Amino acid sequence: MSLSAHRCASCGATALGRRARCPACGADAFAPTTLDGRGTVHSVTMVHRAAGPSPIGPTPYTLVLVTLDAPAMDKVMALAHEPPSIGDAVMVRPLQEGAAAAPYIAEPTA
Ligand SMILES: [Zn+2]
């Protein structure tokens, strides 16, 4: 399972999802790329009151901010079935099988 991303043709910064401009340099040319999804948990949030229904079930649920191992890549927000600890190694993938975009799920690596 991999993550679909776009790599800036000017500076090489990588972003998930469709962008009109590179968040790092402002260029507007991108090349599609894939990321393996490996990363490290940066922060953990337990959501007890949600603005809307969660794709993984009722509250409380866990949101994690993950720093992906890919070079020049920003952090990505993902859901988690079990609350990880900060610093845990995780694998991030689209929650729905075959989807190319958010929502994402973070799962512990074996
Ligand atoms: Zn750029």
Image (cartoon, rainbow, N blue to C red):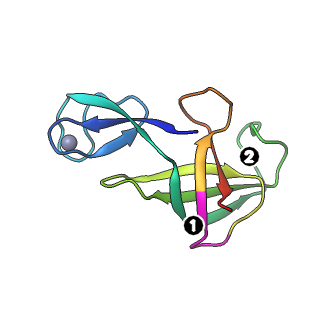
Residue 25 image offset from top left, x and y in percent: 17, 44
State the image quarter where residue 18 is shown.
top left
Q: Is the C-beta of the residue carrying label 1 under 8 Å from the nearest atom of ligand 1?
A: no
- Residue 20: x and y, percent? 29, 27
Helix, strand, or loop for circle 2?
loop
Left or right of residue 19: residue 86: right
**Is residue 68 one of those drawn in magenta?**
no
Residue at point 52% right, 55% down?
Answer: 38
- Ligand 1 lies under 8 Å from the Cβ of mark 2: no
Determine the image quadrant of residue 12: top left
Which residue corresponds to the image point at 85% horizontal and 45% vertical from the top-left?
58
With 46 as the anchor, is 77 left or right in this view?
left
Label 2 amino acid?
Ala
Q: Secondary structure at mark 1?
A: strand
Q: Residue at x 18, y 35 (%)?
A: 9
Q: Nearer the viewer, residue 60 or 95?
A: 95
On the image, numbered disc 2 is attached to which residue?
50
Q: Quadrant of residue 60?
A: bottom right
Say whether residue 88 is magenta. yes
For disc 1, the marked residue is 43
Of residues 101 and 62, the one drawn nearer to the viewer in this rendering: 101
Q: Amino acid at mark 1?
A: Ser
The quarter of the rendered structure image containing the N terminus is top right
Identity of the residue drawn at 67% across and 37% down: 95
Residue 46's spot in the image, x, y percent? 72, 61
Considering the image in quadrants, where does the C terminus appear? bottom right
| Residue range of the region highlighted in magenta in the rendering | 85-90
What is the residue that sits farthest to the right in this orientation?
A: 58
N-terminal-most mark, 1 or 2:
1
Q: Nearer the viewer, residue 21 or 69?
A: 69
